Each structure stands twice: as C-alpha cells, then as structure tokens.
Amino acid sequence: MRHFLAIFVVVPFCASAANAPPPGIPISERDRTELSTATKALKKGIDDYDGSKHVLLPDIIIFYNAVRYALDDNMFYQAKDVDSARILLALGQKRLAQLRLGKHPWTTAAGLVVRGYRSRLDDSVIPFGVEIPDNYNPRALKKWRLDVWLHGRNNNLSEVRFLTERLNRKSSFTPKDTIVLHPYGRFCNAYKFAGEVDVMEALGHVELNYPIDHYRISLRGFSMGGAGVWHLGAHHASRWAAVAPGAGFVDTAVYQNIFTKKPEPTWWEQKLWNLYDVPPIAANFANTTAIAYSGELDKQKQAADLMAAAFEREGMKLTHLIGPKVGHKYEPKTKLEVARHVNAAANKGTSAYARKVRFTTFTLRQNRMKWISIWGLEQHWKEARVEAEYVDDWEYRVKTQNVTALMLEQLEGPKQGTSNYVVKIDGQILKTKPKRNAQILLRKFNKRWEIMPSLQQNSLVKAPGLQGPIDDAFLERFLMVKPTGKPMNVTVGKWVEQEMNEAITQWHRQFRGNARVIQDKHLTRKDFSQNLILWGDPTSNSVIAKIAGHLPIIWTKKGIRLKDKSWPADKFVPVLIYPNPFDLRHYVVLNSGFTFSEYGHLSNSMQNAKLPDYAVLDMRVPIKERIPKGVVHSGFFSERWELTESDGKD
C-alpha cells in the first residue's frame, strides 16, 4: 500500500527571509476553538459525502481550506476576519447540504459567486470568483463574453479575505452581458509560475462550466494585476481579444534599477529574466489588441513607456491612455475611455486563424501562437522568432530565427481533388500533401528545412515542457520523493532535510497549495508519469541511486564531478533538472524546490528563477545568502541535454 505524507501541520514553518504571507494578529482562544470545531465538522461532512470524488466538491472545499489555512498559518489580519471565517464555514455547510439533496444552485446563480477547482500541479483545491450577469440563463443558447480580472498585490490577501471580497465586491469593470473571472493567482506572485498556471486553470474551469465565447475573452488588471496582464498578454496573446494592463511592471532590470545594487545579478539570472520580461517579446501583441493605462503621476507609468518604445521597435503603436493628474489609480473619465476601447476589441473578437502571425520567444515553455508552434530551438535563451502568413491557394510564407522545428496548422479544408500546400520558408520552397486537418511539420537540418512525418526524435533533446530551468518542474504535476536510507555523510543528510522541509513549507506559504510527498520506498512506476523532485543522495534515496548512472554528473561519497571540475561531497551538493531516464516525457529534479522563495516578500518583480538547469551549491552557505554567494558552479544544458564548455553562457 502506498503512503503519502500529510503536510498540513506535519512540516513546521521554517523561519527565513521569505516572510510571505506575513503573520496576522492573535485571536482569542474562544474564537480559535469555535472555528477549529466548525472547520473539523465541515471537513468530516466533506469526507463522509458519498460521492467523495464529486466534481463539485471543490466548490465546498474552498471554504474549509480558507479557514483551516488561516488557523494554521496565522492569517487573521483584523478582528472582522474571524466573522468572515464564520460566514464562509456556514456557506460551506449550506452547499454541502444542498449537494446531498442533489442540488447545486450556485452553479447557475447570477451575481457574485465563489468556486474552486483541483489543480493538476499538486491536487490542491484553489478558489476563484466569478461575476455572473443578472440576465444569465444557462439554458439559453448564448455564448457569453468573458473578462479575466487580475487583482493587485495585497500581502494580507488570505483565502478568507479573497473569498469574502469576491462575495461582496464587484469588479472595477462590469461590462454588460459579460462574465468576469477573478483568479486568486495562488496569492501574490504577479501571476508567474504557479500563479500563471492558476489563471489558465481557472479560465479552463470557467470555460468548461459556463457557455463562454472563446473568441471574446479579455485580460485586465491593475498594479500587480497589470504586471500579470502584461506578461500573460504577451505570452498567451492569441487567447485574448483585448489585453488591458493598468500600471504594473514589465521587466526586472529597469523596474528594480538593478545594476546600481550589489551584488549584481548573475549571468544566468539575467538570461532567465526572459521567462517573464515583456519588452523583448513585444511583437506578440501583434496577435491581439493592447490598451495600456497609466496615471500621469504614477511611477509605474514607466512600464507602459517602455512598452511603447518596444512596440515602436516592432513597427507597431501602443494605445496608451493616461489619466491626467492622478497617481496609482484610474482617473474616472480615462477609465471610461479604457472601457470603450476594451469593449470595442471584445466585440470584434479574436481569430484563431488570422492570416498573419508574429511570435517571439526565448524558451519552448512558451512555444505556441495561434496556428504556429515551435518545437525546437538552435539555442535556448536567445531570441527566437517566427513571422508567418497564410495566403490564398494553400500557401504559407514563413520567416524564422533561432528555430529548428516548426508546426503549421491547416487553416481551411483541402481543395476538392487535391490538397497540395506550398511552404515558402527562409528562402526555400517546399511542397507537401498532408492528410485532412493534419499539421504541416518542418525540421531544419544543416540550415535546410524539410517536411517531416513527425517531430519526435530518437535522441534526447529539449522540447516543449522539457527544456528547464529547475523551476519549470513546478509548472506541471510534481511529486516530492523523500529519502529513507542513510545519507552518504552527516552534512548532506542534515542539509537535505532542512532544504526539503523549507521547499514544502514555502510551496504552501507562497503558492497556497500542499506539495504531495512520498517516501522513495513507496514509489511505483505509475508515479513516473509526473515530475519527480528527488531529495537526498545516491545512498539515501533509492530513486537517485537508480538514475545516477544516466545523469551528466558523477556524485559519490568521494565527491561531485562535472566534466573536469570536482568538489568534495561533505561540503557541496548538486542540484539539477533533467529528463527522467525512465520516462523521458517528465523531469527529475535533484534537491531543489522553486528557486526564488527567499525573494517573494521583496518585490513581485524579483520572483524570478534564480538557478539555471544545474548548479553546485556550498552547503555551508545559508539559503538566504545562497544567490550568488553559495553557487560555486552553474549552467544550462545544451539543446541535447549535454554539458558544454561554456555552461550555456554563449
């Protein structure tokens, strides 16, 4: 029988620099006892429900989680939060009673509604809010416009406060005949990493449960929400009819004035800014309609000014509306103008089959735009571009940069009697006759493009969702694997235990979920169908021992070796991400959680990946001083997951 370790209260909070969320106020023992008793009662009702896998149970679990987390994590920030918790528990009991009768009126209710879904990342139930128009009728044959609203930063935004706000406060914008989605974003991370996944998962849940017009979805937000809109708008531009950021930030270096500070960011960290920096991928906004807003006196106007310059470099013009004589807020008249522009774009809608597509990326994690997708790069973290146009008579014209594999979708049915396509790409002319609705697949060999029957390769290569860096493992389903054997030395044993507990704790505190944990001896082959976060060393963790010979490093009791470099094993430890040798569709990670946990409380613009594909860490350096002091060696694997002489600096 397999055993997963419960971590709600088993792993204590580890005090560190990452004090996010901050501690709340003390509440009376009477209130704590009352809420604990009511929370346990709701949990028992959920556990005893006959349909324990019922698809609507997350709509009830959100209330249990909200109060349980507030109690466990000390997240009552005002006395009224206690009253809010009581109301939420009562609402949870009410929904549970309705579900027992086979009823679920909240799923078709108009007005302010809170719901939940179970995330693919960690099975955690995550809340979101929706605003449903008063004239909503689920039986009517109507597709509804959807606006996604991203909230601003609030370090005290507990689940209790988020749900309470979503049950009582309307959105800043409430367009007619429009459903508004409010993702929680897994707290306050500027909708990056798991926060980005939350937006897309919540959106998918709403599209599944409400009749949404997929071509009339707009993305909006302000402040931290504006920052989220900038990067989600750029990376997923083809999803949105309109992208309307208010304030926010668009990069790390300029916003932080970072090169005036010590220590300067490492070379690999600067490359990794391209995961979320927006100016370098401004061309992607050619695939949607962008309407930026800034207060005239707001320091964050800098972001829209940077983007206006980036648009100009791409031969585009940014619509930038400026509220006169106001700071970090919407000016009423200009707000109406913003709404007018967004409404016009939403009414027009977007098209998945636009004749022209422009796409810029630095990583295969973001590899798709409308009907094109990139499946191979010459080198990661260098700018990759595709400009593609579909012209009449079944012809594509394509120009690429730093791309080695490409997929083009057919935009219309084949001609009667023939379906010959012409692809003019980078000066070449290729002809193909694909099957009905099949994609056109191209791969470049020795600077020449060829039509391929498949883009799968027999050798190990970086591919979409399998390209690193270390933090990428936490953007898909993952499982932490705890060692049960004796460590190779006392130092590494203590270090691993501390790091593992910290990673589990910070995943919960900063991403409001609960990492799934299993002991190595209970792992089965079925568990390999996800990313495995392996803690320990080749003697303490049996899974590490099995894969050790397949990794590009050597790690024994004597030391760690990477090519011609070596370090003693009692002072240093390797961390890395690599394709699982027993399931090449997923990762293994050695001894690392997400790599920016110590920076979450400083600024949302600092919540960026801090380590590349691999590193050697000095175990004597505490975690809060690790970047860059404790990193003695690091780098990116090549496009074939190999070590290189340059470590990816080039």
Image (cartoon, rainbow, N blue to C red):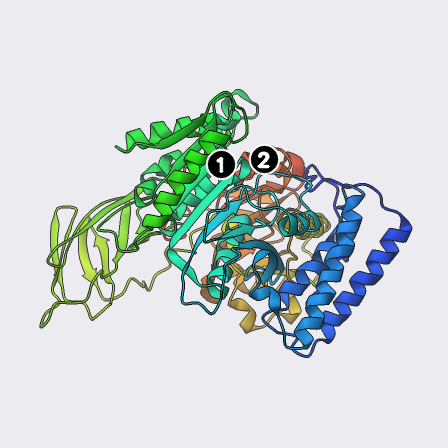
Residue 269, disc: 1
Q: How many marks?
A: 2
Residue 460 - label? none
Give the quarter of the image for residue 92: bottom right
Q: Amino acid under label 1? A: Glu
Q: Residue furthest bottom?
A: 50
Q: Is residue 513 above or below residue 631?
A: below
User: Disc 1 vs disc 2: Cβ atoms closer than 8 Å?
Assistant: yes
Would residue 175 be found to the left or right of residue 502 on screen?
left
Tell me how far mark 1 sits from mark 2, CA to CA.
10 Å
**Amino acid type, mark 2:** Ile
Can residue 644 be seen in this snapshot?
Answer: no
Q: Residue at x 12, y 55 (%)?
A: 392
Question: Between 41 and 633, which is closer to the camera in this rendering?
Answer: 41
Instruction: Kindly identify the residue that appears in the image at 16 percent across and 46 percent down.
Output: 426
Q: Quadrant of the N terminus?
A: bottom right
SS state under label 1: helix
**Which residue is identified by label 2?**
627
622, 431: nearer the viewer? 431
* Pointer 1 local density, CA inside 10 Å: few below 14, some 14–19, many at least 20: some
